[in-house]
Image (cartoon, rainbow, N blue to C red):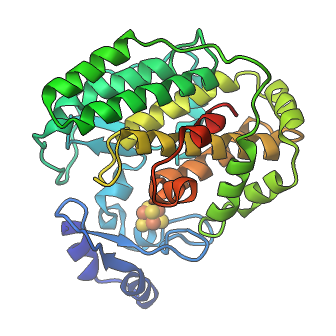
Amino acid sequence: MRDYFKLVGMECGRDLRERLDRSLHILRDATPERYAEFSRTYTGDCPMLRPDGLCMLQRECGEDALSAVCRYYPRSPRTLHSDECALSASCERVCEQLFEKTDRMRFVDVPLEFAYELPKRSDDMITRFYVPVRKLFVSALQNREYTLSERLAFCEKLAAVLRDGFAARGISGIERALEECVSLSPERAAGERDTSGFGTAAYMLSRLAERYPIERYAAACAASEYGGMEKEFLKRFPGWEIMCEQVLVNHVFYDGFPFYGDLRYDIYHAFAALAALYAVWKVSSVCSLACEGDINALVALTSELFRMAENSNFNIAALALLANGGVPEKSVILPLCAL
Ligand code: SF4
């Protein structure tokens, strides 16, 4: 909130003042910690971004004029359910570091300070189970004895059990669901490689491209035959499974998965949105980079898609496309995981 009033009352040149006045607005569900935001330009960029890639606000008024979110980006502190700090994969350097890392991602305790107001710790059912539930999903995603698609299919199973546990609305019901999850194991995919989710993923991309600046990825998918291109893509990027694991684990941590703020959505909805993100990212990567493109192109594509996923209400848009306001169906979700 302090950042908002600082920008509203700040002395600056006419062009910058006009941009601020046109784009800075108070959020409908404003809180003291998340009070206002800039409306994006029609290209999806921040209105303060100059054509030379520099920030007009910082250039004209100095670093202190930036909001805390911009100053700390891509670091994103989370304090509602646990004291944590994630990094956003919307930053290209973060993607590069994730792609370079081959060991399983670990979470470490380090003292950090942030010079702005952060949300106070909540004390509800989600806070109680926030870390144990996420640990289950992270260890499932990091189980390298299975393919990434098999791990995602296992996460679908965990999400279904946990959804029912949380629906019981009691501590004992959730604890039983957690115990049941620990007793479950992933399964090997049987039969032919299932690429039937490609049509759903390509359709989602085409609809998302009406809203986000990702038209070229949607166009690449519209003109592709997925199976053959995936083989070429995996030859070009043999480390894809581990790269993908790191980015997904980072996203789970960044997004507070599977507890999104909106109470309309349960854990299964959260997983459906994660599967949708995986699918649109994978098919975009395959169809755009199978025949040409290097690691830098994959970094650029990944950061663009995670900019869409992490800086907008992507989860809601994805669920609307997948389930049209209803419950996402397993028969739609699993083929996305298989891609
Ligand atoms: S630093 Fe912040 S205000 Fe400046 S261009 Fe980037 S997002 Fe916009």
> In front: 286, or 38?
286
Task: Give residue 275's quadrant in the image.
Answer: top right
- The percent position of residue 206, horizontal first and vertical second, equals 70, 61
- The percent position of residue 187, horizontal first and vertical second, equals 58, 14
Numbered marks: total: 0
Task: Give residue 198's quadrant in the image.
Answer: top right
> In front: 291, or 195?
195
Image quadrant of ligand 1?
A: bottom left
At x 75% / y 30%, what residue is drawn?
194
Q: Quadrant of the C terminus?
A: top right
Q: Is residue 321 left or right of residue 26?
A: right
Q: Is residue 43 left or right of residue 192?
A: left
Q: Is residue 309 among what the camera can see?
A: yes
At x 64% / y 18%, what residue is drawn?
147
At x 32% / y 21%, what residue is drawn?
108
> In front: 66, or 246?
246
- The percent position of residue 310, horizontal first and vertical second, equals 46, 51
Figure check: 248 above or below 122: above
Figure check: 134 above or below 275: above
Q: Is residue 25 left or right of residue 170?
A: right
Q: Is residue 75 left or right of residue 105?
A: left
Q: Quadrant of the N terminus?
A: bottom left
As drawn, the residue found furthest toward the left would be: 123
